[in-house]
Image (tube, grey):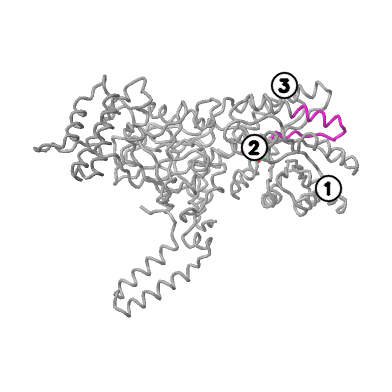
Amino acid sequence: MGEESSQVLSEEQVQLDDGESKPATSLPKPLQLGTKNNSKPANWTIEKSENLYRIAGWGEPYFSINAAGHVTVSPQGDRGGSLDLFELVNALRERNLSLPLLIRFSDILEHRIDRLNACFAKAIARYNYTGGYKGVFPVKCNQQRHLVEDIVRFGKPHQFGLEAGSKPELMIALAMLDTPGAMLICNGYKDREYIETAMLAQKLGQSPIIVLEQLEELPLVVEVSQSLGIQPLLGVRAKLSTKGVGRWGTSTGDRAKFGLTIPEILQVVNQLKEAGIINSLQLLHYHIGSQISSISVIKDAILEASKIYVELAQLGANMKYLDVGGGLGIDYDGSQTNFHASKNYNLQNYANDIIAEVKDACSERNVAVPTLISESGRAIASHQSVLIFDVLSSSGVPSDLPPSLDIEEHPIVRNLWETYKSITEENYQEAFHDATQFKEEALSRFNFGYLTLTERARAEQLYWACCKQILEIARRQAYVPDDLEDLEKIMASIYYVNLSVFQSAPDSWAIDQLFPIMPIHRLTEEPTERGIVADLTCDSDGKIDQFIDLRDVKPVLELHPFKSDKPYYLGLFLGGAYQEIMGNLHNLFGDTNAVHIHLTPKGYKIEHVVKGDTMTEVLSYVQYDAEDLVENIRRRAEQALLEKRITIQESQRLLQNYERSLGRYTYLSP
Ligand SMILES: *Cc1c(COP(=O)(O)O)cnc(C)c1O
């Protein structure tokens, strides 16, 4: 989807942000600049924003906040310069790239690959491990061509390979991987064509390893091997009894969808011996699910797998590789816990535990240690992209007091007035129950015809005013009683954003996955509002109302008051894995614009622009032909003209609008 733009933007050089405060010309409001000598109330600081949005927790070393109160990106981690994300977005908008906009930082990808490899190298040195490490990128995590090209290129020094989980992904992996010695792992359902293609690719100098995941694949492999006269490279995927935990936990265990049970693995060994190709079996693979948040699960799995590996070697298989699959987690909420949106270990712990465990198991039984392979997708691809979207409007709960009138109020309204006036630190909980009860009473009286519309409006206004005041008190308390916890939700503003959750963050909708979301500017200013995010679709599920927090999740996000004459940009971070391809066309919102940014010594370079879908494109996915649609409208306009229901000017204007829209982005323009 989407076409690569022919515009040559790549030579663009832009000055680097040096991390110091920016010249005031870039922002019309000097009040927002700098922390020290401005006239902002001194009680809000950048540090407070950092703590509030937990940016160091999930964003290190790539994302932080500069003195101007903008999010900055350091795509090369600690070893390079940084960019002001807000200014980058403005610069991209000047180039006619509309929001929502997916910004990819190829340097982050490179840094992630280097870091994973460095951690394994360190672990290998530390434990005197005599085998090597050769990672692969599971293509299913993000199949975009530019990204896969980058991974292959950045992976070259590490002999980093690719993993295919389906036939189309095999097509990608075979064509894109050209690194001598890198692994090409073939997983997923396989038919004869898949197997033949993988084996024949050996003649091109590649070494695809066909991983048997189902028993039925074995006779097919033997047959194809015999008819082609090629000795296959084989692996087996074991169903471990170790269970993953959390969201993706069900992908493991005895009832897992993929993999062979231990009796089945023995059957494979015997049949390969019978066929005289037991030498082909070189790899043991397992995958216990994604985002494993607990290191103890990772240890249990590698312990079980290394024992199987050693046994296979002793049974006469030509074992060389142990492939530990994916599962390496990301700390989405920065809490460093085994909460599903976090993980209680780091990359180095992960590498150390794997290397140490495998070494022990092998030396115990005098088996040569394997080359280790991991298929880390989420850990490689999540950080590289940032989704930027703008707020279109916001609506808060109207909490202003109604004007006091010189009339005899309805008793219910009077009760609410009294409740309102009597709220204190001591009785705020009781006041909340009173106000709620009076409001409910007002509603039921209205339904029975005993309250006028005006009286009902006054009752509701007073109720919201009570809630607002009670909430202010509750927020100051160290402990908030359970029955008041919903108050934040009740009082949350709705921020309407130029985005489709279904297209750009499908896991947030489908499996309640948490992504860090925060404003990318105004961070010197206190975010006084509490809101949820509602998208453009007319689906009531098209919203985000769970946000990262140190403990559990929070139902509202701290946001700045929206001003209709100023853009307000939010960023969704760590969404570089799985979201793009699973995004769908709900309400026909298409792919977003995407740009690839690469840091240069003097600034940055826009390496690729991939334009998002136009309306014509999304309509064609559901078999509408744009020309037919235009023709249809033209005919109706002619008829209306004949019947004098429309003027010629009006009909021309309508047609122009219609035609122009078809060529446009599916999202709203400012
Ligand atoms: C999805 C998948 C991966 C990637 O898992 P991550 O948790 O994203 O690293 C690796 N291997 C297999 C077999 C998979 O199905």
Relative side of 271 to 333, left or right: right
Dot 3 or dot 1, earlier in sequence = 3
Q: Is residue 147 magenta?
A: no
Q: Which element is circle 2 on? A: helix
> Which residue sits at x=37%, y=31%?
486
Q: Position of residue 300 (x, y in %)?
A: 68, 25
Q: Which mark is residue 219?
A: 1
Dot 1 or dot 2, earlier in sequence = 1
> Which residue sits at x=26%, y=21%?
427
Q: Which element is circle 1 on? A: helix
Crowding near the residue tagged with mark 1, few <14, some 14–19, many ≥20 C-alpha atoms within 10 Å: some
Q: Which element is circle 3 on? A: loop
Q: Which residue is mark 3?
A: 127
206, 493: nearer the viewer: 493
Quadrant location, ligand no. 1: top right
Q: Quadrant of the N terminus?
A: bottom right
Of circles 2 and 3, the one toward us is: 2
Q: Amino acid at mark 1?
A: Pro
Q: Position of residue 635 (x, y in %)?
A: 40, 76
Q: Which mark is residue 515?
A: none
Q: Are marks 1 and 2 in contact (CB under 8 Å)?
A: no
Dot 2 or dot 3, earlier in sequence = 3
Q: Which residues are magenta?
A: 305-324
Q: Distance of mark 3 from mark 1, alpha carbons?
A: 40 Å
| Extreme-bottom residue of the structure | 642
> Which residue sits at x=36%, y=42%?
495
Residue 3 higher or lower than 373, as above or below = below
Asked whether mark 2 lies closer than 8 Å to ligand 1, one says yes
Of circles 3 and 1, the one toward us is: 1
Crowding near the residue tagged with mark 2, few <14, some 14–19, many ≥20 C-alpha atoms within 10 Å: some
